[in-house]
Image (cartoon, rainbow, N blue to C red):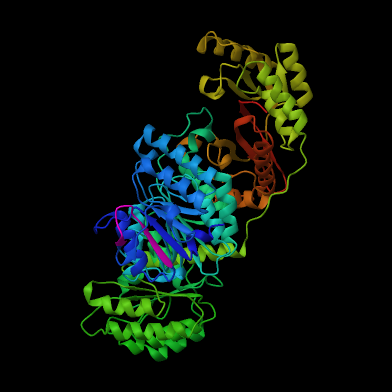
């Protein structure tokens, strides 16, 4: 627990300089001016008093045991202070000092020594290299930020001190009200997961906001974030999305997976919402601090400028924010309230000369409509406008409704007073229509998360022992990839249907397999030196009879000897031709932070070109697998277009779920591609036509 950081009764600051301008002095001053009601003790062996408070030479000389110690001394001296804290009985410390692992190898060694000292002393550490923290319920400002935020319901954690100061300044200027702000610094001890666990049961917290550059422990973060999102929304800005450092792999899945895909999957698995810019994070914090999540979808747009309404409508479509269909009764009511030239259907245009009362009447009518569940009010200042009175009218209308109302008062300094009225009236106001739509889209996304909570996958029946024996045989052979026949066997162990097939080392065996499976068949070269068979002409499809088989077999062997000289040839793998259907790719890759990751996309040879794929962390339920399919741009092909029958989406989802469990239960499998999964018409099932498995490590 982190009570010492957020609800201390006494705070000591080590390294309080006598002169202003130094970090320790600034923190001590912030503690005093911020309204903290407990004792604050400055520590400086060279001073008798600072800012009217008696000074102490060290931690052990303090008149009592502080609940929190803030440390601002040179890096080389921090471990000794932590040891003093342990002797005194202190359990919580914030290390503001820089000069640790962010500076290189020598600093990293200092940080390891600091953590060892803290563990030996029984002290929890925030930092080092931290900006500090604020806890508004306790009137605690134990930071060296220049501004104190507004009090509110947002708990904000940041791996960037600079972004943290920007958030604090935004809050002080009328942005989101904060319950807590924590600068994590180097996260040697207390990290993002610990904070989310602590805040998950805190009644002061209405929402969480996080700026992350990395996550120290992926599974711990997902667990903590799920715990947090059971009670409040969590919005995450993840920086550093480049895939430049992704592991080089040979599979389609591995080549498409990257750090950003993994974080997307992890944030979704945690029940959190991801934003893509600091602007979106700040906007979301304000919206969730002031507004309730809507009960249903359906947004109405009210404007005095047609162009602004069009921009908002376009952004709503881009963000998948459903616009409300205005009921006929509401339309008739609007006709009685607005000029004849007004637009009465969504978006509703009250015209440029709209006085405040016209806005008030339209807001009331729209909020009374049972199909409207959120309202966006757009305003542009014109010669006849009264922005202050209009803002007051909007606040009054919003106060009489439980439905969320957001505003965009688009303009400059002339609107500052109106924007303040809206903020004080709990109506978040944004400078552009697009940003206002964005926050309503996030509120709606949170609504969808609440009505469809995260499912817990149930482990299916699987013959794990047989699958592991097959993997052991592959490892013993010294090859990093399972053969076609081993891959098919492993898939079948998890209930993944594959076509009938077998390995032929000569024509006699080839005929026997073809006879057993039935024509037509497909021939695939079997070689540990050839990973992508189609790239070298190593696949022959639609072999219709015995005569064609002889020709195809001999031609295939000769072609590979010519194109890949020196390749070891094990023979030819024969399979019954899969029936025609839609093609998917299903694969797994392993992320260093989050573990096994599942990919689903449109399959075939163009998968890396089209990149119509989506990712989740393993395992997934069949329902979650269907959700993945629905996210694909080509999902319409599965539902059926131009009179085509719908595909067997249920069968495809079962295969996807089974693959995700294979990844969990067989950690030896580093990568897997099934490309394609052939999906027949509804009721016809699906087949894993080509399974490729790469292994490594040990059980």
Residue 665 sits in which quadrant? top right
Magenta highlight on residue 43: yes
Q: Residue at x 55, y 49 (%)?
A: 221
Q: In which quarter of the image is the C terminus?
A: top right
Quick one: which residue is furthest to the left in this view?
383
Q: Which of 610 and 234 is in front in this view?
A: 234
Q: Which residue lies furthest to the bottom in this view?
A: 336
Q: Give the left or right position of residue 463, taking residue 568 as reference.
A: right
Instruction: Point out residue 537 in the picture as x, y percentages from the top left corner.
Output: 54, 20
Residue 675, picture quadrant = top right
Dividing the picture into quarters, in which one does residue 145 lie?
bottom left
Residue situated in front as seen by the camera: 200 or 546: 200
Res 3 visible: yes
Q: Does residue 632 appear anywhere in the picture?
A: no
Q: Which of 212 and 519 is in front in this view?
A: 212
Residue 20 percent across, percent down from the top left: 24, 59
Say whether residue 28 is left or right of residue 585: left
Where does the image place residue 252, in percent across and percent down from the top left? 52, 33
Q: Which residue is drawn at 35% across and 55% down?
A: 163
Between residues 581 and 224, which one lies in front from this camera angle?
224
* Residue reaching furthest to the top: 566
Picture layout, residue 397 above or below residue 115? below
- Asked if 289 appears above or below 495 in the picture, the reply is below
The residue drawn where x is 49% and y is 83% is: 401
Q: In the rendered view of the protein, which quadrant contains the N terminus?
A: bottom right
Magenta segment: 39-49
627 inside magenta stretch: no
When the figure is inspected, residue 461 is found, relative to residue 364, above or below; the finding is above
């Amino acid at each position: 627990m982190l009570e010492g950081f957020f609800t201390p009764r006494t705070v000591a600051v080590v390294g309080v300089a006598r002169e202003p301008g130094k970090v320790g002095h600034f923190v001590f001053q912030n503690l005093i001016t911020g309204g903290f009601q407990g004792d604050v003790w400055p520590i400086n062996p060279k001073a008798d008093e600072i800012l009217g408070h008696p000074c102490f030479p060290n931690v052990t000389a303090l008149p009592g045991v502080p609940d929190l110690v803030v440390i601002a001394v040179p890096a080389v001296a921090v471990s000794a202070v932590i040891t003093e804290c342990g002797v005194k009985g202190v359990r919580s410390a914030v290390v503001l000092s820089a000069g640790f692992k962010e500076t290189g190898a020598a600093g990293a060694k200092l940080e390891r020594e600091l953590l060892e000292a803290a563990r030996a002393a029984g002290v929890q550490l925030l930092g080092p290299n931290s900006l500090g923290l604020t806890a508004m319920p306790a009137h605690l400002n134990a930071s060296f930020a220049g501004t104190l935020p507004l009090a509110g319901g947002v708990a904000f954690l940041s791996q960037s001190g600079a972004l943290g100061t920007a958030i604090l300044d935004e809050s002080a200027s009328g942005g989101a009200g904060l319950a807590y702000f924590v600068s994590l610094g180097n996260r040697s001890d207390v990290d993002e997961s610990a904070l989310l666990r602590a805040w998950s049961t805190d009644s002061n917290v209405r929402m969480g906001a996080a700026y992350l550059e990395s996550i120290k422990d992926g599974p711990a973060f997902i667990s903590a974030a799920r715990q947090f999102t059971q009670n409040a929304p969590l919005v995450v800005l993840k920086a550093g999305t480049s895939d430049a450092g992704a592991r080089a792999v040979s599979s389609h899945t591995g080549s498409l997976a990257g750090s950003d895909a993994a974080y997307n999957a992890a944030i979704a698995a945690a029940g959190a919402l991801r934003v893509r810019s600091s602007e979106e994070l700040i906007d979301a914090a304000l919206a969730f601090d002031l507004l309730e999540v809507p009960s249903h979808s359906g947004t109405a747009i009210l404007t005095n400028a047609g162009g602004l309404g069009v921009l908002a409508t376009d952004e709503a479509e881009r963000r998948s924010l459903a616009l409300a269909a205005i009921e006929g009764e509401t339309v008739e009511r609007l006709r009685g309230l607005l000029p004849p030239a007004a637009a009465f259907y969504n978006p509703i245009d009250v015209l440029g000369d709209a006085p405040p009362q016209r806005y008030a009447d339209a807001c009331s009518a729209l909020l009374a409509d049972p199909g409207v569940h959120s309202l966006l009010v757009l305003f542009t200042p014109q010669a006849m406008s009264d922005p202050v009175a209009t803002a007051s009218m909007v606040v009054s209308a919003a106060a009489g409704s439980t439905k969320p109302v957001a505003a965009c008062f688009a303009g400059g300094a002339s609107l500052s007073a109106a924007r303040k009225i809206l903020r004080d009236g709990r109506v978040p106001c944004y400078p552009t229509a697009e940003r206002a739509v964005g926050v309503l889209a996030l509120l709606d996304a949170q609504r969808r998360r609440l009505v469809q909570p995260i499912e817990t996958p149930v482990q299916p029946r699987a013959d794990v022992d047989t699958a592991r024996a097959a993997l052991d045989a592959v490892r013993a052979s010294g090859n990093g990839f399972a053969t076609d026949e081993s891959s098919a066997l492993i898939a079948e162990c998890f209930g993944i249907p594959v076509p009938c097939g077998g390995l032929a080392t000569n024509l006699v065996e080839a005929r026997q397999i073809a006879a057993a499976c039935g024509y037509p068949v497909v021939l695939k070269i079997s070689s540990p030196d050839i990973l992508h068979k189609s790239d070298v002409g190593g696949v022959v499809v639609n072999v219709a009879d015995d005569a064609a088989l002889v020709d195809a077999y001999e031609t295939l062997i000769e072609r590979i000897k010519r194109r890949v000289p020196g390749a070891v040839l094990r023979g030819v793998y024969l399979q019954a031709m899969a029936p025609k259907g839609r093609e998917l790719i299903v694969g797994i890759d392993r992320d260093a932070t989050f573990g096994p990751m599942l990919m689903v996309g449109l399959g075939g040879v163009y998968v890396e070109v089209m990149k119509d794929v989506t990712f989740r962390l393993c395992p997934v339920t069949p329902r979650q697998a269907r959700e993945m399919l629905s996210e694909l741009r080509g999902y319409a092909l599965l539902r059926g277009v131009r009179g085509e029958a719908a595909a067997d989406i249920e069968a495809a989802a079962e295969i996807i779920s089974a693959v995700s469990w294979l990844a969990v239960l067989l950690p030896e499998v580093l990568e897997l591609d099934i490309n394609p999964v052939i999906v027949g018409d509804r009721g016809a099932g699906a087949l894993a036509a080509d399974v490729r498995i790469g292994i490594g490590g040990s059980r």
